Image (tube, rainbow, N blue to C red):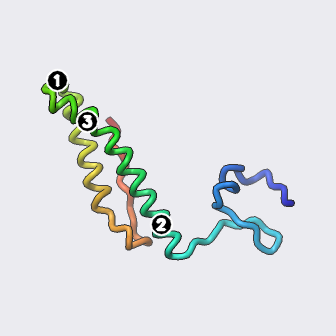
Amino acid sequence: IVESDSLPYDDIISGKYQFVDNKIIPRTYNEVELTQITNAEKSKKLKLANEKIRPLQDAVDLGIATDEEIQKLGAWKRYRVEINRIDTSNLLDISWPLPPDV
C-alpha cells in the first residue's frame, strides 16, 4: 500500500499513473494505446459537436432559427469539420481545435 497526498484519486484510478519500483510514476503508453486514446478523444469531440448541431439544424430546417442559432450552427459545423480533418495516425503532431465559444 502506498499513500500519496499529491495525486488526485481520479488520476490514480483512471490509470494515468502506475506503481513501479516503489514509486508512483506517470503511466507510459505504447503506440497502440496512444492511437486508441487519440481516436477516443476524436470521437468524444465529434459526439459533442453532433449534440450541439442537431437542435440548431432542426431549427434551421423548420424555418424557425434565430440569427444567433444560425451563427452557432455555422461555428459548430466548422468545428466538426476541423475535428474530422485531424489525422490521428500522426500522434506527435495533433493540435486539437477549441470548441466554439458561442
Query: Counting residues from the N terminus, which is met first, the one under dot 2 or under dot 3?
Result: 2
Q: Secondary structure at mark 1?
A: loop
Position of 47 with respect to 80 (left or right) is: right
**Structural crowding at the residue carrying mark 2, measured as other residues with C-alpha within 10 Å and reported as few (<14), some (14–19) or many (≥20):** few
Question: Which amino acid, mark 1?
Answer: Ile
Instruction: Tell me where residue 34 appears, x and y as whole percent.
Output: 50, 69
Instruction: Count up the numbered dots.
Output: 3
Residue in the picture at 66% in, 66% down: 26
- In which image quadrant can residue 48 be found? top left
Q: Secondary structure at mark 2?
A: helix
From what the image shows, is residue 65 above or below residue 11?
above
Query: Mark 3 = which residue?
Result: 72
**Structural crowding at the residue carrying mark 3, measured as other residues with C-alpha within 10 Å and reported as few (<14), some (14–19) or many (≥20):** some
Q: Secondary structure at mark 3?
A: helix
Residue at mark 3 to residue at mark 1: CA–CA distance: 14 Å
Query: Mark 2 = which residue?
Result: 36
From what the image shows, is residue 73 above or below residue 25?
above
Residue at mark 1 to residue at mark 2: CA–CA distance: 40 Å
Question: Which amino acid, mark 3?
Answer: Lys
Mark 3 vs mark 1: in front:
1
Position of 28 with respect to 100 (left or right) is: right
From what the image shows, is residue 58 above or below residue 28?
above
- In which image quadrant can residue 97 be found? bottom left
Question: Which amino acid, mark 2?
Answer: Gln
**Structural crowding at the residue carrying mark 1, measured as other residues with C-alpha within 10 Å and reported as few (<14), some (14–19) or many (≥20):** few
For residue 64, the mark is 1
**Residue furthest right as drawn:** 1
From what the image shows, is residue 7 above or below residue 31?
above
Residue at mark 2 to residue at mark 3: CA–CA distance: 30 Å
Residue in the picture at 39% in, 57% down: 42
